[in-house]
Structures are given as structure tokens and as C-alpha cells.
Amino acid sequence: MNRQRLVILVLIALVIGAFYLSGAHEFLTLDAIKAEQARFQAWLADDPLTVIGGFFALYVVMAALSLPGAALLTLLGGALFGLGLGLVIISFASTIGASLAFLIARTLARSPLERRFSRQLDRINRGIEREGAFYLFTLRLIPLFPFFVINLVMGLTRMRLVTFYWVSQLGMLPGTAVFVNAGRELGTLESLGGILSPGLLASFALIGVFPWLARWIVEIAKRRRIAREYDKPRHYDYDIVVIGAGSAGLVASYIGAAVKAKVALVERDKMGGDCLNTGCVPSKALIRSARLAQEMREAKRFGLSAAEPEVDFSAVMGHVHRAIEEVEPHDSPERYRGLGVEVVHGDAWLQTPWEVRVGERVLTTRHVIVATGARPRVPELEGLEERDVLTSDNLWALESLPKRLVVLGGGPIGCELGQSFARLGSRVTMVQSGSQLLAKEDRDIAQLVESRLEAEGVRVALGARAVRVEPGPSHGDSGRVLVIERDGPEGVETERLIFDRLLVAVGREANVSGFGLEGLGVLPRGNGTIDVDGTLRSLHPNIWACGDVAGPFQLTHASAHQAWHATVNALFGEFKRFTVDYRNLPAVTFCDPEVARVGLNEREAAAQGVEVEVTRYAFSELDRAIADQHTEGFIKVLTVPGKDRILGASIVGHGAGELLGEYTLAMTHGIGLNKLLATIHPYPTFSEAAKASAGVWKNAHKPERLLGWLERYFAWRRRSAHSSATAKSSTTRSESHARSLDQ
């Protein structure tokens, strides 16, 4: 910290300390203000300049240092000066104080916090860049956050001081007027009965409804600003036009039609999108064939003759395409037309926020939902020709099994497809730039997957950078070479990997261009997805986005989750909008063993500084897993330390995706481990693992002191029973002896 910052910080600390040590904070209560109101009124009458100047200076200092009591000072100003003069004094004092707080935050904290919290500040900076002064005006007009928080946070951004000042002056004016008016009404209060006066009740009611009123005003202002830039249609053909018929677009269309809105669905290619045609459905069909091949090799474990499977790759791909064909009717144009959706084939182009051109036809609509999905990312690599690259999109046109397959990327797609091709007979090498596979998962889970892949013959190259592609080593070999580099103990190590086909699985990028968004000013974020807020609304109030094109999760069920929010917010947002909640979003990687997770894992908890307690249960303890020979893997449950509230669950093992549902349900509805333990599960099943993990947690939290008392209690009961029996036996012997003497 430089000397200037240190001096400012010391001065601020001294002023704040003096504020509290002097007891000034105790004066800033409603009772204290009411008690001193008459004295202030007399003082104001005698020396108005001193009172006004002193009040103004005090307000500026309190706002600049973000001290508590600004709201009560505003009420006091209304009581002392009335609505007109009070509004002028407080409006300028609050804005000057806010600007000083802005400068203090910028001087003391912007540089270090920009480095440490760049990702968190990026969203605010993007909002400012996207909407300029209107972004701050919205925050000022709708006081969802205290004004002092806005002052400090804005100081950390790149906004100019002049812009901050004039926008704050205007934006805080309505809210200030409401509070000053309430203070004026309080100033006229003569008795407790006056609390029920219509004027006072109306003033406080206005404080309550002002945020909603301001939000409505902001919405109208936004719509009018956009309407001035484009020619708005006089009437609309549709309530919603959905662009893209993948998972998100289909769900959005379904929901819109279900509530009787008029919906048009525009698709330029196949209905069903990636999930049906190139993603979820075909990959799971391929994984099933590959798993069966591996089970044939491992049949000896079950007392059966093991055999190396004869793989007819064309027949395998036939099975894959049959799976697509059987699911296809669920996503067909005929089905959606039957639901009331108008399906339009062609390329969509947004002419204005309300007009979508498809060929020669122009569809006018109240709202547009962009659900254009994503495509595989192909890196720029020297010597790599795109026609030679396999991706998750074009893989399904393969007619023969590659003998030597190099998979570039060790994420979910790379692991699933790499393992499947290895099981079907390819020699597979996986190249991962990071230090582990499945970079988002905990290291112990990733290591277990890596060990299984290597045991099945997959070579895994971690920490490897792809450098270039070269021709094959000899004319007789049709293969090519991928050159990779790794950091070794003696510097950079180079290796050459020969392949017949190269599968690129390094991620996906959103389809944000080619349909007119750029011309409307809807620009992508730094990660390439459409810039939308928490309700999935873009810069334009009537353009929404959901699914892979919006991010941040490229999962089919995440797309459906977003589609519900985008559609409901579009159709009913005038009344209520819903923010998307991703806290309990499950994710599954369908390699073997499967990897499934919901909520936090240990890696994320550490990164976020969240303290957790970890409960671990191994499948080797589960009876059904032992019987089925699926003992590999474990469950990790993260809870609040000392409590049974679940913060996250990670599972690696057979059927992990199916087991995850119970934890997701528990987290969504606030069900703790104690209730999971109290739930009857059928025996023997894999679902018992959820109850068993709860049992492990319970055993670690058993009440030792109570159990100690119970141990003493039962020991006493045993001794008591023994003493009673002994006494009874003695009595019996005495009576018997007495009878013998009588005889």
C-alpha cells in the first residue's frame, strides 16, 4: 500500500472512530430525533444558515464514509425543512457524499480488488459498457441494494466520476423524495393517534411500493428507448418466436404452446438439435455397445467363458442410428405442430427486436427466444485440416473403426468417446493439457477414472500441449503425426503420436453469429455466450436466450431448466420474473465408472472458502455392488460442519447418474442426511448407498455423552435385576427352611 492510500485510510479510521466514540450513532434513532425535533426547529428559526450548513456537511460525511443512519437523517431533513427545501438539501448532499465514497473506493481498493475479483467485477463492467449510464440509473431507481453499496462497488469499476455524479443525482431523486415526504409527515405528528393519519400511512406505503413502481418505470423507459431506434410493428403475429429446435428451443416452444401463447419455432437443420442427432442419444447408444464388449472380455469374473468380441463397427453404428430414429418422433415437426406450435424451416435473421426474417417471410413477435446451441471448438493447430478432424458432430458418419485414435481433450466428451472406441478395439491415446482428466471434478475422482482407462489400454498423456500435425512417418503408412510437448524435469519434452484419426474434444463454442444479433447490439461475453442477466434477458427487454448459447452449463437438462425460465419470464415478466437457480444442478459424465455430481465438491468448496465436512462411503461396502462385482468407486457427501444439511454430493462408480437423483431431490427440498437415513430403501439395491452414506455421517455424529449415560443405565438395570433375583432366591430358601423345621 502506497503512502497516499495509507494516509487516507488512517484519516477515515479516525473519523469513524470519533463518530462511534462520541456516541453520535446513538443519536441517530427515530426516538432521539423525535425528542430533539422541537429544539432543532427553534435552532433553525434562529440561525437557518448554520443549521442547514451543518446538516448538509454531516450528511455528506456520513454518505462519504458509508456510516449508518442516512435513512433517518433523510427523515429528519423532511421533518426540519419540509418537502421542497429538504429535498434540495438532501439530494445534493447525498450525491456529493456518494461521489466521495466512489472516489474513496476507487483510490483505496480498485487496483487490488480488480486483480483478486476480476471475474465478479466483469459482470458489472459489462453492464456499464452495454447500457452506459442507464445501468447505474436502474440501480439507483430500484433500491434493491443499499445506496452505500452501489457507491462503493461503482468505485471499483471503470465508470467516469462525472457520469456517476449526474446519474446518481437524477437516479436517487425519486427515492429521496419518498423518504423526505415521510419525514415531513412525521414532523407533523402530534400524538400516537396521528400514526394512523392518511398522509403518514400513504408516505410509508409509498416507501414499500416504490421499488416495484420504479421497476415498472424503468421497463417502460427501456422499451421506449429501443422503440426509438427501430420501427416497432403495430401488431404482432406471434407471442414468441423461438430460434433453434434443440433441447432449449423445444422446451420453450412446448411451454409457450401449453399456456396458449402463439409460438413459431424456426430451425434450419434437424429438429432435436445436438442432443438427439449428435450428442446425448447417439453417444449413449455407442457407450452401451462398448460396455457390452467390455463385459464379454470380463465374463470370467462371473464364471463364464471370456471372449474377445468380434466388433462389426458398421453394425454398431447401425444400432446408434436406430436409437436416434426411435427417439426422433418425440422431437418431430409433426408432434410440435400437433401441440399448436408453427414449425418454420429456414435461416432466421433478426431485422429488429420484433421482426424475424425467414427467407422471404417476416415474423413479427412480442418476444424472441434465442436457443441456437453450440458447436465443437476446433483449435488452430499448424498442419491441421478441418476435413481431417473428428468431432462429436461428424463422428457418427464414420464407416470404419479407426485403428489408432488420438483424442485431444480429457473432459466428459473425450473420456466417454475415448473409452468407448478403446473398448471397441481402437488403440486410443488421450491428450489433456491439464494435470488431470475431468478438470472440474475432485482429483481423487479423476484419478480413479484415469486408472480405469489405463487398465483398459487407453494411454493418457497429462500436461501435454498439442503443437502441430505432421505427415505420417513413411509413405506406406496412411497415418499422420500429432506433435505434443510437456514440461519435464530437464525442460520441454517433445513426443510424436501417430494416428489414423484425430478426435477433437476440447470444448464447445456458442452459436452467436449469423442471425442478426450483432446488428442489434447484442454482443457476446468474453466466453463467447450471449450476454444475458439472471432472468436470461439480453440487452433488449424482449430478446431472451437459453441453452448452450447462453451458458454457463452445456447440459441438456440445464437447457430445459433455462428454457422454462426464459419462456415464463418472456410471457409473464410484466408481473413477475424468475432468476435461474443453478445451485442444485446435477451433472453426469457417462464413462465407466460413471461420474456424477450435484452442488459443491471439495475443489469448489476450497476455491470459494466454504468450510465443509466430508462423508465418504465406498461401494465395496455395499452388498448389491459386491454381488454385481461393481465395487469400484465411492460417494462423497459434503455437509455443513456438524449438521446434516447437504451442500453437495459427488459419486464415482457404477450407475452414479441414477444414484445422484436422491441427493438432488434432498438438496432441492432441504432434506438432510438424518431423513435419508430414516427412509426405507429396498434391499439389496444400489439405492441403499444413499442411506448407507447417511449412516456413515450419523455414526460420526453419535451422541457420545448420551451413549455413555445409556451404558451406565443398562449396567444399572442388569445389576438391579441380579440383586432382585438374589434377594428373591434368599427369601425362597428361608421360607423352604422354615417349612422343613415345621415338619
Image: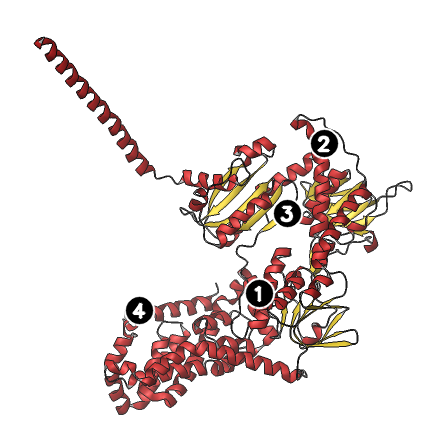
Q: Position of residue 662 (x, y in %)?
A: 52, 47
Q: Looking at the image, which residue is at 64% across and 64% down?
A: 254
Which label lies toward us, 3 or 2?
2
Amino acid on which disc 4 is placed: Tyr
Secondary structure under tag 1 reads: helix
Judge depth for marks 4 and 3 and give the one in front.
Answer: 3
Report helix, strand or loop for mark 2.
Answer: helix
Q: Amino acid at mark 3?
A: Thr
Whichever of callouts 4 and 3 sits on the residue coming sooner in the sequence is 4
Which residue is outermost to the front? Answer: 743
Which mark is first along the chain, 1 or 2? 2
Q: Is residue 33 left or right of residue 334?
A: left
- Where is residue 714, by image quadrant? top left
Looking at the image, can residue 531 be seen?
A: no
Residue drawn at (76%, 54%) of the image: 393
Element type at mark 3: strand
Q: Which residue is mark 2?
A: 297
112 relative position to 297: left or right: left
Separation of residues labelled 2 and 1 (CA atoms): 47 Å
Closer to the chain start, of discs 3 and 2, is 2
Name the residue that disc number 4 marks.
20
Label 4 close to label 2 by CB (< 8 Å)? no
From the viewer's perspective, is residue 154 above or below residue 428? Answer: below
